[in-house]
Image: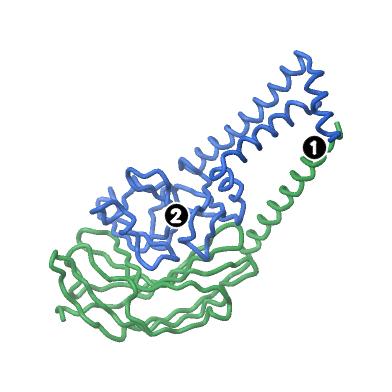
Chain colours: A blue, B green
Amino acid sequence: MGCIRNMVDSVKSFQFRQTLSQLITLGLIVSTALMLWKGLMCITGTESPIIVVLSGSMEPGFQRGDILFLHMSKDPIRAGDIIVFKIDGREIPIVHRVIKVHEPNNNKETYLLTKGDNNPMDDRVLYNHGQHWLQRHHIMGRAVGFLPYAGWMTIIMTENPIVKYILLGSLTLLILTTKE
Amino acid sequence: MHSFGYRLNALFTFALTILALICAIASFTDTFNHPNPLAQVKVLNINWFQKQPHGNDEVSLTLNISADLQSLFTWNTKQVFVFLAAEYETKKNALNQISLWDGIIQSKEQAKFWTHTSNKYRFIDQGSNLRGKEFNLTMHWHVMPKTGRMLADKIVMPGYRLPEEYR
């Protein structure tokens, strides 16, 4: 309780200069996070360097809530690699393993077939109707590293947006009310 | 300056930093493991071999696979994903890789095994190039860590050949 009263008091005792400097601090934190994210995008060469596993199709290797680090290198994709791909016209990316590769001589395209380790069938049932192969433009990256459980917060926040607003609100309040 | 929230934040940040450091160290210790896995595969039988109605060759094999992957396991190993792929070159394709069999090994005790199986995934060529085709069987493994970097390697076993005629 005392803690909340303190906060309210400090909100009441705001002065213009102090508020401004705290807003700048907030801006700094936000832009640092943005810079880190964009920097990672440049280094890894993929539009989302870190993704959260949403389904159990790669169990027992990856479980819901685990975090994967992606990398998009020049090395060609080979059977056994775990890739993240997006089917045309669908929003949610899929993390599965490559089981077949056909690579033509001209090196322009690659034909890949994927499968989830925990799924009984290959992914042709997931692809669009009439699509037999994944091609280069579907691929967002290759999984190179793994961190368990770290993505649960993201899952909770996307599934209950209220939690996200409460968390963001309280964080902002905390930053605005802490005195240097 | 030393409010409750501030201290909580400091404690939380410190705990997370230490945890991240421990994860990184755990992943780093994997580099000291120099595994020497063994694998042997025999093609026991060509069950059937034919051209599909739309022109792609398909073959069904019976395989005898034996391997000892125990040396891949360290204290940071969650599982080893192992698969056997047929790899060959055709006129059109510089590389064809077709997974024939795979398995998930979750403990060191299960990492020494042998199995007698027909191919789990269909061995279909992209075109009709399989008659008399020489191919490699490659045992690939992907080590999934409890945390950190994923490692992969393979053993290439050359010198297999498909028959000249469909059967």
The picture quadrant where one finds residue A154 is top right
On screen, residue A180 above or below B68 = above
Crowdedness near tag 1: few (<14), some (14–19) or many (≥20) residues, C-alpha within 10 Å: few
Q: Amino acid at mark 1?
A: Gly
Chain letter for mark 1: B
On screen, residue A6 above or below A49 = above
Q: CA distance from mark 2 to mark 1?
A: 38 Å
On screen, residue B115 above or below A162 = below
Front-lying residue, A69 or A17: A17
Q: Is residue A89 left or right of residue B35?
A: left
Chain letter for mark 2: A
Which residue carries the number 1 mark? B5
Q: Amino acid at mark 2?
A: Val
Crowdedness near tag 2: few (<14), some (14–19) or many (≥20) residues, C-alpha within 10 Å: many
Residue A51 % position (x, y): 52, 48
What is the secondary structure assignment of the residue under circle 1?
helix
Please tell me which residue is depicted at 82% across the width and 40% down the height of the picture.
Answer: B7
Image quadrant in which the N terminus of chain B is located: top right
Residue B123 % position (x, y): 27, 71
View extreme (front): residue = A1
Q: Which of pointers 2 and 1 indicates the residue nearer the eye?
A: 1
Which residue carries the number 2 mark? A95
